[in-house]
Image (spheres, rainbow, N blue to C red):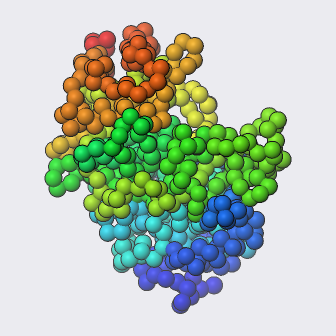
């Protein structure tokens, strides 16, 4: 079979063609389809997916352009235990990553991929991570035998011919191969080869494992490339805060998976904040590089949102509710008899019956949930009514603040600011959070998740901290660094902070600090707001005492916290920058 039949193959790039040929020889598909990203192509592939039962067409009057997908029940989340960083030397991947030598992993993958596309089509998916023409943008080409992946990549990345335009004759593109195989957890591997800018993913069809531009290229390979090239690939949302007098301040924030990054990125300020507006640049990933003016500039490499569905409603995220009314692929939610979707926490009445995420009949009396806890929407960012006008700007946006945060029932105050960059790096490096459904594993347990990058750092975590410290020298005007916790509870288990839109109050203090409009009090942990500067007006029944409680520092809890932090530091000790050990000692002495 010829790989590049004239009229079908849409690139002249000889490296791309040779690489596709080699993979086709290995996987032996019946057909090769070169995607161009056009609307006609989307319509044809969608129709085919509906005919084959891969997608269900939803009520097009209510949800124009929206489709429904159900995954294999064994394949509903990222699989960190099957995710590998394959570097020649194990130490390069470090103790927080699974490792296999590239030669061994390539051989294993060859064995699994060989002949695996017989009777199937191999789709060649060219895409950009980042806006066309940006110096930060990277090109990827993903080969996949899943139409669901092609259609989702079209939403999540700038997919199609423009990728070949950016690439030209260059050999510099990420080589991604995805083979579904029989979607068997025993034969599931997400293998990264940072030195080759390559990824091979087999045995899964779940977004985080197979939309290779996202976690694989934009974070794991991206973090490795960023370290070598002097930029940062981070698990961060980016948003712009516009004040009533038009001042715009951009911040980036790292929270672990399923801790409300999408909600925060699309925040709607409460009525009290007249004239304030939040603009979304991105909800999951930031690529950041020092700009010519000495500030740190960020782009969102993605073009869509792959968000957790349950709990999405007009209180938690009214902007997402609007964004997912059109052109959205819903995965693993409930499906109602009239072609609508439903999930726990959706606005409006609970349906009398529907099919649950496994396709079983569901009623309000069912014990199981209708939507899987990690059910997802894939929606184009262009649908977002609050999309920042600079979301597509090749130069990115200047970042004034970096915010770290996790899901912590105790210990962590609502807000504090680091004393300086290196102290901020320490705060990010020691982040902990209760685990969520976004990854398979011990739900609810606190685990260390430095900079929310534990599952996504493509090299040794100690070297990654060193890179953060080194970056300070390249940024003349570094962003200020903050820590937040929306999830602190009292001893009866009640949340001490209302969260959602009210997080604007915290954001306003952060922005005021960056712009020199607010003072702060020094504590053992860092700078915190004066009660008088922290705006609680219009927040019904929220007393200053409650604010003091959510801000309180409990020395016993902090002693425990320091011991827990040590577990990670011991694990990566050989590569741990000494500056972080000094920061720990300073904190101990302050406490
Ligand atoms: C995600 C994740 O899907 O972090 O964004 O798991
Ligand atoms: Mn994420």
Quarter of the image where the C terminus is located: top left
Q: Is residue 378 visible?
A: no
In the rendered image of this protein, does residue 422 appear above or below residue 227? above
Q: Closest to the observer: 513 or 214?
A: 513
Relative to 272, residue 399 above or below: below
Instruction: Please indicate, yes or no, whether residue 59 appears anywhere in the rendered image.
Output: yes
Task: Name the residue at 47% across, 20% down.
Answer: 541
Single out the residue that lies furthest toward the top: 556
Q: Quadrant of residue 13?
A: bottom left
489 relative to 554 in the view: left or right: right
Q: Residue 15's spot in the image, x, y percent?
A: 43, 76
Q: Nearer the viewer, residue 572 or 429?
A: 429
Q: Is residue 222 above or below residue 432?
A: below
| Image point (58%, 79%), residue name | 40
Q: Residue 373 in the image: x percent, y percent?
A: 65, 40
> Where's residue 20, x and y in %?
53, 74
Q: Position of residue 336 (x, y in %)?
A: 76, 52
Q: How many marks?
A: 0
Quadrant (top left/top right/bottom left/bottom right) for the N terminus: bottom right
Residue at 81% x, 44% y: name it.
352
Residue nearer the viewer, 202 or 212? 212
In-front residue for pair 336/491: 336
Residue 210 occupies quadrant: bottom right
């Amino acid at each position: 079979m010829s790989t590049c039949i004239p009229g079908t193959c849409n690139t002249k790039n000889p490296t791309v063609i040779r690489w596709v040929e080699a993979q086709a020889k290995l996987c032996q598909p019946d057909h090769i389809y070169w995607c161009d990203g056009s609307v006609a192509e989307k319509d044809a592939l969608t129709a085919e997916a509906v005919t084959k039962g891969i997608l269900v067409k939803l009520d097009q009057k209510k949800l124009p352009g929206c489709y429904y997908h159900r995954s294999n029940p064994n394949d509903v989340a990222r699989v960190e235990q099957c995710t590998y960083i394959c570097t020649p030397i194990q130490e390069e991947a470090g103790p927080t990553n699974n490792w296999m030598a590239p030669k061994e992993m390539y051989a294993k993958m060859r064995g699994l991929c060989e002949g695996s596309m017989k009777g199937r089509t191999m789709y060649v998916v060219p895409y950009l991570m980042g806006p066309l023409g940006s110096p930060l943008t990277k090109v990827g080409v993903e080969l996949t035998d899943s139409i669901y992946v092609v259609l989702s990549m079209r939403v999540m990345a700038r997919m199609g011919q423009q990728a070949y335009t950016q690439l030209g004759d260059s050999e510099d593109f990420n080589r991604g191969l995805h083979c579904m195989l029989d979607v068997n957890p025993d034969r599931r591997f997400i293998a990264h080869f940072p030195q080759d800018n390559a990824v091979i993913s087999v045995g899964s069809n779940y977004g985080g494992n197979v939309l290779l531009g996202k976690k694989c290229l934009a974070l794991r390979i991206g973090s490795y490339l960023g370290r070598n090239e002097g930029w940062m690939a981070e698990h961060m949302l980016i948003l712009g805060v516009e004040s009533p007098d038009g001042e715009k301040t951009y911040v980036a924030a790292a929270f672990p998976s399923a801790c409300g990054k999408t909600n925060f990125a699309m925040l709607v300020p409460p009525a009290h904040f007249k004239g304030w507006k939040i603009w979304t640049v991105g909800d999951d990933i930031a690529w950041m590089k020092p700009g010519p003016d000495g500030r740190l500039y960020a782009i969102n490499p993605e073009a869509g949102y792959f968000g957790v569905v349950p709990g999405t409603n007009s209180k938690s995220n009214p902007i997402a509710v609007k964004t997912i009314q059109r052109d959205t692929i819903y995965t693993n939610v409930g499906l109602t008899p009239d072609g609508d979707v439903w999930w726990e926490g959706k606005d409006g009445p609970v349906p009398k019956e529907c099919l649950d995420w496994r396709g079983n009949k569901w009623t309000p009396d069912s014990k199981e949930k209708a939507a899987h806890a990690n059910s997802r929407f894939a929606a184009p960012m262009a649908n977002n009514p609050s999309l920042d006008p600079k979301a597509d700007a090749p130069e990115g946006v200047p970042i004034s603040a970096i915010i770290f945060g996790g899901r912590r029932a105790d210990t962590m105050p609502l807000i504090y600011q680091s004393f300086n960059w290196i102290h901020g790096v320490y705060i990010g490096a020691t982040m902990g959070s209760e685990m969520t459904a976004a990854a398979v594993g011990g739900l609810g347990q606190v685990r260390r998740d430095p900079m929310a990058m534990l599952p996504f750092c493509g090299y040794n975590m100690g070297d990654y901290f060193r890179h953060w410290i080194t970056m300070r020298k390249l940024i003349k005007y570094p962003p200020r660094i903050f820590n937040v916790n929306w999830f602190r509870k009292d001893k009866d288990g009640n949340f001490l902070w209302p969260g959602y839109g009210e997080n604007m109050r915290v954001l306003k203090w952060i922005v005021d600090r960056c712009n020199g409009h607010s003072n702060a009090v020094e504590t053992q942990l860092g700078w915190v707001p004066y009660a008088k500067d922290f705006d609680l007006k219009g927040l019904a029944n929220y007393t200053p005492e409650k604010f003091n409680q959510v801000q309180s520092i409990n020395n016993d809890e902090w002693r425990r916290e320091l011991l827990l932090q040590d577990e990670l530091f011991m694990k990566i000790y050989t590569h741990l920058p000494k500056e972080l050990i000094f920061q720990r000692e300073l904190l101990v002495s302050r406490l």
